[in-house]
Amino acid sequence: MSVTMPFHQGRQTALETAPRTSSESLTATRRVYGRIHSVETCGAVDGPGLRYVLFLSGCPLRCLYCHNCDTWDPASGRLQSVDEVMADIRRYRPYFRASGGGLTVSGGEPAMQADFVAALFQACREEGIRTCLDTSGYCEREAAERFLPYTDLVLLDIKQIDPFHHRRLTGVGNAKILAFAQLLAEREIPVWIRHVLVPGYTDSEEDLDGLCRFAASMGNVQRLTFLPFHRLGSEKRREMGIEDPLAGVEPPEREGMERAWDAARRYGVNTDGSY
């Protein structure tokens, strides 16, 4: 069961942020504002248990298969304070307690609003609400250092392990992403890796082998999930007048998914795949 509540787009662009000092009060922290795209309550796929999924605006990647193109613009959505968001999140605490769920912050790319994510996760930590970050990992280490102390789980979307193919697929290189993954390993933060299988773009034997080898080397990856490419974003692209470069690409066959799962098993990486 889930309810999606898109917000109306606002025109404000500046974020109000609290000073980050050692004496920063809880009140000041909760005046930090984020730009919110939409909310999904009782989500069941973005982390353990039932999740309150908060989608933030803005993304530096332009993935060819993206089905959330409406989150790309960092000036879209609506400004809300940590206090305002927490007031809504608290309504779902009984569901979190019953299911082992909590808050997931997604996007867009939530790391673009590192101060807001840090303040929100800190508020959740103080109230016993488990936190999860759904990210591409495309961020600077200094930004990650702000929110990782309050992050219980990371859903890390590794788009492509090969740097050349990654740029072709997303428009940016993957050096920052792999460095972020190494930081998570250093901090021993639990990670679920997600990887979309796009025929002809991310499903070669070489790419799958490299991805699974990297996941096995981290030591903190609890699972690796292969998600089959789908065409749900095509209609949104048409509505927004955005070219669909994968218009002729079909979802992977069962055989393609099996090859991915086999690669994970060869490296002893837990995979929860079914198709």
Image: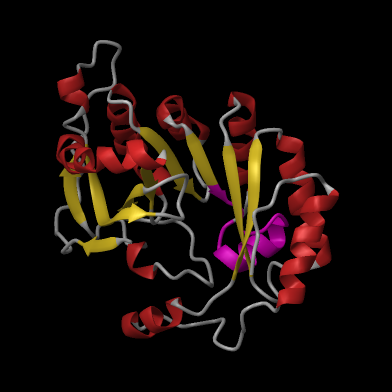
Q: Residue at x 21, y 37 (%)?
A: 90
Q: Quadrant of residue 34?
A: top left
Q: Is residue 252 above or below residue 68?
A: below
Q: Is 262 left, or right, of 5 in this rendering?
A: right
Q: Is residue 83 visible?
A: yes
Question: Which of the 4 image quarters holds residue 67?
Answer: bottom left
- Residue at the far top in the pictured view: 23
Q: Residue furthest front?
A: 98
255 to the left or right of 93: right
- Residue 158 among magenta residues: yes
Query: Which residues fall within the magenta stretch?
Result: 156-172
From the viewer's side, name the closer residue of 220 and 174: 220
Q: Position of residue 26 (x, y in %)?
A: 20, 20
User: Is residue 265 left or right of 62 when viewed as pictured?
Assistant: right
Which residue sits at x=66%, y=59%? 160
Figure quadrant of the N terminus: bottom left
Q: How many marks?
A: 0
Residue drawn 62% across the image and 39% down it = 181
Q: How is the image coloured?
A: secondary structure
Give the quadrant of residue 149. top left
Q: What's the residue at 53%, 72% (across, down)?
A: 65
The spot of residue 274 in percent (x, y) is 64, 64
Q: Is residue 56 magenta?
A: no
Q: Looking at this view, is 83 or 142 the one in front?
A: 83
Residue 109 vs 125, above or below: the answer is below
Q: Is residue 56 visible?
A: no
Task: Give the residue furthest to the right.
Answer: 266
- Dividing the image into 4 quarters, which one contains the C terminus? bottom right
Left or right? Give the position of 257 relative to 193: right
Q: Position of residue 234 (x, y in %)?
A: 44, 82
Task: Locate residue 272, reporting x and y percent.
Answer: 64, 54
